[in-house]
Image (cartoon, rainbow, N blue to C red):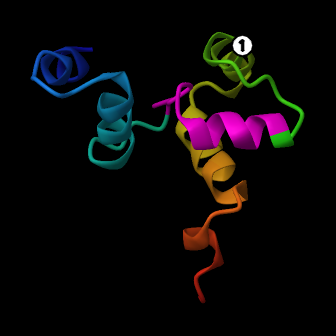
Amino acid sequence: DKARADLLALPGFGPWTVEVIAMRALGDPDAFTPTDLGIRVAARALGLPDTPAALVRRAQAWRPWRAYAVQYLWATGDHAVNRLPA
């Protein structure tokens, strides 16, 4: 869409950054970051495909809610931020 294209035209903004902005700032429930290392590691741990192209194909079934899947995958990772006290 136009917002993504405008952001991609800016120096230093790549697909990952644009999708995270779409997810967090623009509220796009279908934003998806298949190149994110945390997503790929979590997908592999859950028995899902872990290459960006294969993740895109698998995530078609999650439309239009792929951003929620991203949040879930990020939360499953073994990372210090996921172990912070509630």
Which of the pair 64/47 is nearer the observer?
A: 47
| Residue that lies at the very extreme toward the right in this rendered image | 47
Q: Residue at x 68, y 20 (%)?
A: 55
> Label 1, on which residue?
54
Q: Residue at x 20, y 19 (%)?
A: 8
In this view, 72 is above or below 47: below
In the image, is residue 9 above or below residue 24?
A: above
Give the image location of residue 67, x and y in percent: 53, 39
- Name the quarter where the N terminus is drawn: top left
Instruction: Say whether residue 86 is magenta.
Output: no
Please tell me which residue lies in front, 73 or 31: 73
Percent x, y of residue 79: 63, 64
On screen, 11 above or below 1?
below
Name the quadrant containing residue 21: top left
Residue at 59% from the left image edge and 71% from the top image edge: 80
| Residue 42 covered by magenta stretch | yes
Secondary structure under badge 1?
Answer: helix
Q: Position of residue 11 (x, y in %)?
A: 10, 23
Q: Amino acid at mark 1?
A: Ala
Q: Position of residue 31 (x, y in %)?
A: 45, 31
Binning the other alpha carbons within 10 Å of mark 1 as few (below 14), some (14 to 19) or many (20 upward) gives few
Work out which quarter of the rendered image holds the C terminus and state it. Answer: bottom right
Q: What residue occupies the far bottom of the structure in this picture?
A: 85
Residue 65 visible in the current orientation = no
Q: Bounds of the magenta span?
A: 30-44
Look at the image and tell me whether residue 67 can be seen.
yes
Q: Is residue 62 left or right of residue 68?
A: right
Q: Measuring 20% from the left and 14% from the top, which residue is drawn there?
A: 5
Query: In which quarter of the view is residue 70 placed?
Result: top right
